[in-house]
Image (cartoon, grey):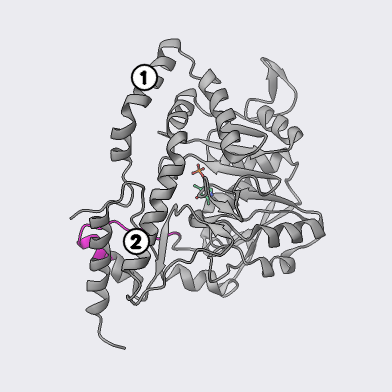
Amino acid sequence: MNVPFVDLVSQYQGLKDQIVPALENIMGKAQFIMGQDMRLFEQEFATYCTTEYAISVDSGTSALELTLRAFNIGAGDEVITVANTFIATTLAISATGAKPVLVDINPETYNIDATKIEAAITRRTRAIMPVHLYGQPADMDAITKIARNHDLLVIEDACQAHGAQYKGRLTGSLGDAAAFSFYPGKNLGAYGDGGAVVTNNAKVAERLTLLRDYGQKQKYQHLIKGYNRRLDTLQAAVLRAKLPHLNDWNSARRQCAARYNEELKDSDVVLPVDADFAESVYHLYVIRVQKRDQLLAHLQSKGVSAGIHYPIPIHMQPAYEDLGYQKGDFPITEKFADEIISLPMYAELGKDQITYVVSTINEFINNQPRS
Ligand SMILES: *Cc1c(COP(=O)(O)O)cnc(C)c1O
């Protein structure tokens, strides 16, 4: 049996009848840039996130970077985030000229350990950027409390958490602003790159519309020095066709996670835990095992595609040598980086496929010599 890591082809087969005419309509009108579907998607995504505004952009990385810029964060400033994340989180901070300051993770949730944030605050700190990694919300009440006490902004990296909930409230609505990615493999994915910022702050929303479009409100009248970071109308049309399905896909992912949990409960692996405050949307289903690299190779040899998110923590990346961190600075992140493995996860993943993945894992574990 072959089990892919994600299966965007079977999702497309089911949506073809909606997507193809929408794309043809745009091409027929040649409304490629800032077309009607872009505006409509922004309204629909803001409604989905229960926020006042959504500003579409060309990627999740741009969404993060332009949000920081909209809040005038840049050179000389520090932004606190987490050592266990995708590099885009810190690249967005660095792109503004600000310095990423890292914090270790909570070993239960794999998200930023809120109890370690205060020690990372300096007089240069402007914002905390929690990442809702793997689709599970970070502990936002604890983070917001610290931010309030120190007069800091909270900018959510919600790039893996479309539709996830924290104490019944949607990610994206929990901080001062939030960034989403519509990279094809995300829970809500375009057919290319895309992203959005959501916020209730009218001024920041206004600034973001300028920043993404050459700093102009009217053509050729440039109020600030902006960028070209717009979402293609074609991508917006794809996202509009997909958004109504997002909740169903997320529930299907949660069911797949529950099935994995059940089938793996007697295996010698560490299962993911839904924090009591969280409803994860399982962008990734991540377990921990000993001999991770061998398991990965075994799965691959049996037709199962698995992944590692992420094998090298931010502070151990050559790109971030300049931050001056050492091995040992974030011990939980470092330990987990050697043990985590992400199993196939997508809404269409079948029962028999999960059973096959689990039996392939068990086959590997049971063939290990006892230690
Ligand atoms: C995907 C992702 C991003 C970046 O999004 P892109 O659309 O790929 O630029 C940022 N942060 C996290 C946690 C992500 O998973």
Quadrant housing residue 70 = top right
Characterize the local packing of mark 2: few (<14), some (14-19) or many (20 or more) Cα atoms within 10 angstroms: some
| Mark 1 close to ligand 1, CB under 8 Å | no
Q: Main secondary structure of the magenta part?
A: loop
Provide the residue designation for mark 2.
259
Q: Which residue is at the far bottom? A: 371
| Residue 63 screen position, x and y as percent | 59, 40
Which residue is at 57% across, 23% downward? Answer: 39
Relative to 226, say whether 357 is above or below. below
Q: Mark 1 highlights which residue?
A: 21
The three-letter amino acid code for the residue at tag 2 is Arg
User: What whole-number distance in Å separates the C-alpha atoms at marks 2 and 1?
Assistant: 36 Å
- Is 102 magenta? The answer is no
Q: Give the image location of residue 326, x and y in percent.
A: 59, 71
Is 308 inside the magenta-drawn segment? Answer: yes
Numbered disc 2: secondary structure: helix
In front: 49, or 208? 49
- Quick one: quadrant of the N terminus? bottom left
Vertical placement of 350 versus 355: above or below? Answer: above
Q: Residues within 10 Å of mark 1 (few under 14, many from 20)?
A: few
- Magenta range is 297-309
Which x, y percent locates residue 53?
66, 33
Question: Is the CB–ligand 1 distance for label 2 below 8 Å?
Answer: no
Question: Could you tell me if residue 243 is visible in this image?
Answer: yes
Circles 2 and 1, Cβ within 8 Å, touching? The answer is no
Q: Which is closer to the viewer, label 2 or label 1?
A: 2
For the residue pair 85 and 326, the one nearer the viewer reads as 85
Q: As drawn, which residue projects farthest toward the top? A: 29
* Drawn side of residue 371 relative to residue 52, left or right: left
Amino acid type shown at disc 1: Pro
Tag 1 secondary structure: helix
- The residue sitting at 31% across, 88% down in the picture is 371
